[in-house]
């Protein structure tokens, strides 16, 4: 009798699955269920380009900015997205870019702060202006774009948008360093802290704020990597830009609004690996 009961329940479960598939009421995992308006900084190449491509392929309206006009126009042409030539360290240019999107779209649902540079040099050869420049590209724009989105939501409070996502691309270097990386480490540490601060400040506008810390992500010539490059990672391979893009898409699913103020490390397990020198 127990066996028949279990068989009957299993048949009911299978019939329910088939019914959902036929009438389209079931939601597919890994899919954003509505078309969203997405803005990405630094989207012309590397990780940013992978994010642009993935969100566009998921059927969303995508715009991105970058200071590389040649690569930006090429990415826009190949992905069917909108490109704005902007140096994110230019506050006015970045704010104007977002305002154009507000004027055209009405709002921005998803903001991904990806733009960044790495300038590594011995501290004795690094000028204060060099340090400032890295922060002006990597860190300050995260505040500028987030503030602009908050100000826009404040102005449109009579017709509130109850969906919002901000994702900031951080780095595992927010917690681990090599010599000569002061500017980069400081900027990524700032993004880590700014993320949880923003998650509280922007909660009133239904915006979650999270960061992603990539480890080694090879953005070009992946085939040229050595076997030992892959072998050192517990996951058995070096990362790809798509690894980061998929996490961005995951965080933007409607049902994942309970993930907020977090930093998610994607590094193949490297920061969990204890390393000692052997004689």
Image (cartoon, grey):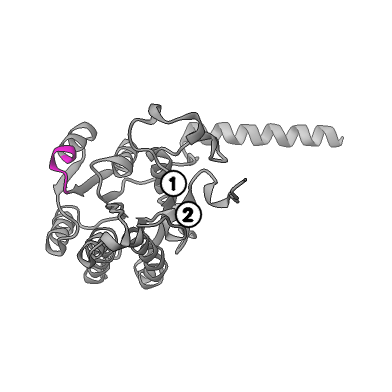
Judged by depth in the image, the label closer to the viewer, 2 or 1, is 2
Q: Which residue is mark 2?
A: 264
Residue name at image x 45 percent, y 64 percent:
261
Residue name at image x 30 percent, y 44 percent:
48
Tell me the quarter of the image containing the C terminus: top right
Residue 127 vs residue 209: left or right? left
Q: Which residue is mark 1?
A: 247
- Mark 1 lies on a secondary structure that is helix
- Mark 2 lies on a secondary structure that is strand
Q: Are marks 2 and 1 in contact (CB under 8 Å)?
A: yes
Kindly report the distance in space between the C-alpha atoms of the residues bearing marks 2 and 1. Answer: 9 Å
Based on the picture, tell me whether residue 203 belongs to the magenta stretch: no
Residue name at image x 40 percent, y 48 percent:
248
Tell me the quarter of the image containing the N terminus: top right
Residue 201 vertical placement versus 252 (above, below): below
Q: Can you give x and y, in whole percent of width and height, for residue 211 in the image?
A: 41, 57
Q: Which residues are magenta?
A: 67-72
Q: Quadrant of residue 208?
A: bottom left
Residue name at image x 34 percent, y 30 percent:
221
Q: Can you give x and y, in whole percent of width and height, for residue 243 in the image?
A: 43, 40
The answer to whether residue 55 is seen in the rendering is: no
Residue 24 vs residue 19: left or right? left
Magenta residues: mostly which secondary structure? helix
């Amino acid at each position: 009798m127990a066996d028949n009961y279990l068989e009957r329940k299993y048949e009911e479960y299978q019939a329910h699955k088939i019914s959902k598939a036929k009438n389209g009421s079931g939601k597919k995992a890994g899919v954003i269920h509505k078309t969203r308006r997405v803005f990405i900084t630094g989207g012309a190449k590397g990780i940013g380009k992978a994010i642009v491509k993935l969100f566009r392929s998921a059927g969303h309206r995508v715009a991105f900015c970058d200071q590389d006009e040649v690569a930006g126009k090429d990415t826009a042409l190949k992905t069917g997205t909108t490109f704005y030539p902007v140096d994110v360290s230019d506050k006015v240019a970045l704010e104007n870019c977002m305002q154009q999107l507000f004027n055209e779209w009405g709002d921005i649902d998803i903001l991904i702060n990806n733009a960044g540079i790495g300038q590594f040099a011995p501290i004795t050869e690094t000028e204060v202006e060099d340090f400032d420049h890295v922060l002006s590209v990597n860190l300050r724009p995260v505040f500028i774009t987030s503030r602009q989105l908050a100000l826009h939501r404040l102005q449109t409070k009579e017709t509130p948008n109850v969906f919002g996502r901000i994702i900031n691309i951080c780095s595992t270097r927010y917690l681990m360093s090599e010599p000569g990386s002061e500017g980069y480490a400081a900027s990524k540490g700032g993004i880590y802290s700014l993320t949880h601060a923003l998650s509280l400040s922007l909660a009133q506008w239904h915006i979650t704020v999270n960061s992603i810390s990539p480890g080694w992500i090879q953005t070009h010539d992946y085939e040229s990597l050595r076997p030992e490059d892959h072998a050192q990672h517990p996951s058995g391979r070096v990362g790809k830009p798509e690894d980061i893009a998929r996490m961005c898409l995951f965080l933007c699913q409607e049902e994942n609004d309970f993930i907020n103020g977090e930093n998610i490390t994607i590094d193949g397990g490297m920061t969990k690996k204890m390393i000692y020198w052997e004689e």
